[in-house]
Image: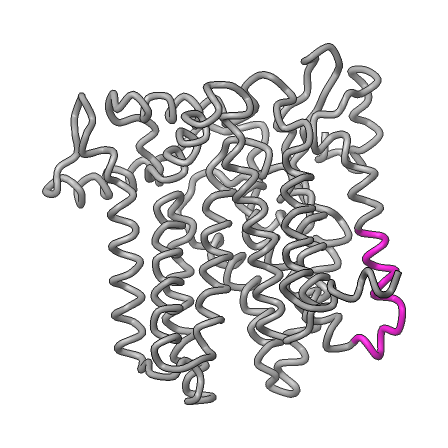
């Protein structure tokens, strides 16, 4: 057995195994239910319009996420598989991206596997990987961008420049899905200056002005390119002169005051899983089924402890990896306190929730000796919760209409 598992101690085989497992898990029974779920009614409809190049629709968000949904429909048809296929790839990219980030931070395969596994059993990643919504695509691009920007810290000057540019392009593509990716452009610019000042050997061949120029140019060109289909609309085609005014119109749509919603929630409640969302709960495909968007309690709550530990460790010893792990979550979450949205929803926490897996993996790696075997017990607990909640994460067949009570631990979960 040890001989069979030995290759998984190396990063590349371990990453491949994790990616295969993630893709298989996300694709299993992907077409259930055979009907539009939650916000698929908006984005699949928009993708259909985009495929036909009829004209602008769902203009409060950029085009790339809907373009990717349309690409899946072109490959597999206008059916549940076509709607959701590309989302599974985004979910797998998130798992692989977290693995890469943790490995770059620790240089240990075990820590990277822990980060990837916790991302896989995060609950939210599984649900978003099986639905035609925008957040999975946005998160996938941002996670891969962070990995690329971190990868650029090492290597020669040429490698550093093209890896940094790759990260910038990925950030631009993330912005081309949802504007929630925009803050990470600023974080990258600030992070470069702070970390380069601490160690000038990082990002060889780049200075702050060249790094910022590449960041702005790469992200800007990639973002602008995502609007290409709009130039070919049969009705109200976009023009170069209209590109900037269109951004202002998008901003107006993003910040409009919306009527109250049953599932709205305040940003400060998301870390404690204050108001998760039932994406689906009805009879479909011959059975009562449900899709519940919530975070794995072991990851959501344990991750907060890990963020606090990383922050404490950084304040005491100035260990860069601890500070970076804490900053990822703090920056990703705190920005929602100032984003001008009239309503908040739990799925806005998706990207910050992913960073919790990074913080946990880094904290476990840093204090593994003190934890002894408790880290393995924690992992088993997180995986056990994943198995327990799995039926209502994936629209499994339930006993009846009242089955939801088994999994709704608190009143706000109903």
Please check the rendered image and state whether residue 208 is part of the magenta-colored stretch, yes or no. Answer: no
Residue drawn at (49%, 42%), measured in percent from left and top? 135
Image location of residue 344, percent across then percent down = 51, 41
Please determine whether, in this image, residue 32 is positioned above or below residue 155: above
Please indicate, yes or no, whether residue 276 appears anywhere in the rendered image.
no
Residue drawn at (53%, 30%), measured in percent from left and top? 84
Count of residue discs: 0
Please indicate, yes or no, whether residue 258 appears anywhere in the rendered image.
yes
Q: What kind of secondary structure does the magenta stretch mostly adopt? A: helix
Residue that protrudes farthest toward the top in the picture: 286
Q: How is the image coloured?
A: one colour
Residue drawn at (67%, 78%), measured in percent from left and top? 312
Image location of residue 37, percent across then percent down = 57, 23
Q: Is residue 279 left or right of residue 54?
A: right
Q: Is residue 314 left or right of residue 73?
A: right
Q: Quadrant of the C terminus?
A: top right
Q: Quadrant of the N terminus?
A: bottom right
Residue drawn at (39%, 33%), measured in percent from left and top? 66
Q: Nearer the viewer, residue 307 or 74?
A: 74
Image location of residue 12, percent across then percent down = 63, 63
Magenta range: 368-382
Image location of residue 199, percent across then percent down = 46, 89
Please determine whether, in this image, residue 323 is positioned above or below residue 176: below
Residue that protrudes farthest toward the front in the picture: 3
Q: Nearer the viewer, residue 161 or 9?
A: 9
Q: Is residue 239 left or right of residue 387?
A: left
Residue that protrudes farthest toward the left in the picture: 241
């Amino acid at each position: 057995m040890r001989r069979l598992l030995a290759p998984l101690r190396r990063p590349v085989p371990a990453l491949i195994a994790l990616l295969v497992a993630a893709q298989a898990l996300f694709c299993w029974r992907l077409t259930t239910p055979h009907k539009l779920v939650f916000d698929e009614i908006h984005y699949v409809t928009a993708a259909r319009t985009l495929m036909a190049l009829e004209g602008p629709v769902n203009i409060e968000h950029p085009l790339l996420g809907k373009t990717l949904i349309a690409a899946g429909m072109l490959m597999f048809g206008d059916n549940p598989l076509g709607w959701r296929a590309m989302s599974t790839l985004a979910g797998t990219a998130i798992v692989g991206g977290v693995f890469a980030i943790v490995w770059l931070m620790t240089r240990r395969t075990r820590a990277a596997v822990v980060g990837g596994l916790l991302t896989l059993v995060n609950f939210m990643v599984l649900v978003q990987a099986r639905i035609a919504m925008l957040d999975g695509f946005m998160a996938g691009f941002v996670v891969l961008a962070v990995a690329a920007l971190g990868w650029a810290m090492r290597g020669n000057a040429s490698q550093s420049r093209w890896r940094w540019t790759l990260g910038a392009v990925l950030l631009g593509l993330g912005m081309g899905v949802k504007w929630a990716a925009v803050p990470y452009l600023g974080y990258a610019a600030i992070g470069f200056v702070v970390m380069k000042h601490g160690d000038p050997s990082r990002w060889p061949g780049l200075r702050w002005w060249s790094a910022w120029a590449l960041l702005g140019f790469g992200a800007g060109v990639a973002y602008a390119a995502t609007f290409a289909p709009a130039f070919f609309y049969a009705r109200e085609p976009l023009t170069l002169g209209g590109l900037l005014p269109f951004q202002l119109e998008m901003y107006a749509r993003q910040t409009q005051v919306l009527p109250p919603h049953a599932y709205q929630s305040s940003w400060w409640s998301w870390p404690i899983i204050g108001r998760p969302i039932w994406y689906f709960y009805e009879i479909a495909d011959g059975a009562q089924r449900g899709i519940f968007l919530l975070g794995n309690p072991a990851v959501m709550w344990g991750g907060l402890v890990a963020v606090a530990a990383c922050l404490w460790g950084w304040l005491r010893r100035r260990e860069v990896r601890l500070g970076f792990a804490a900053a990822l979550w703090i920056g990703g979450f705190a920005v929602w306190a100032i984003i001008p949205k009239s309503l908040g929803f739990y799925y806005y926490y998706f990207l910050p929730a992913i960073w919790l897996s990074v913080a946990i993996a880094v904290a476990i790696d840093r204090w593994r000796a003190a934890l002894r075997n408790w880290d393995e017990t924690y992992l088993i607990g997180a995986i056990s919760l994943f198995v327990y909640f799995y039926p209502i994460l994936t629209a499994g067949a339930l006993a009846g209409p009242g089955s939801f009570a088994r999994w709704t631990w608190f009143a706000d979960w109903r």
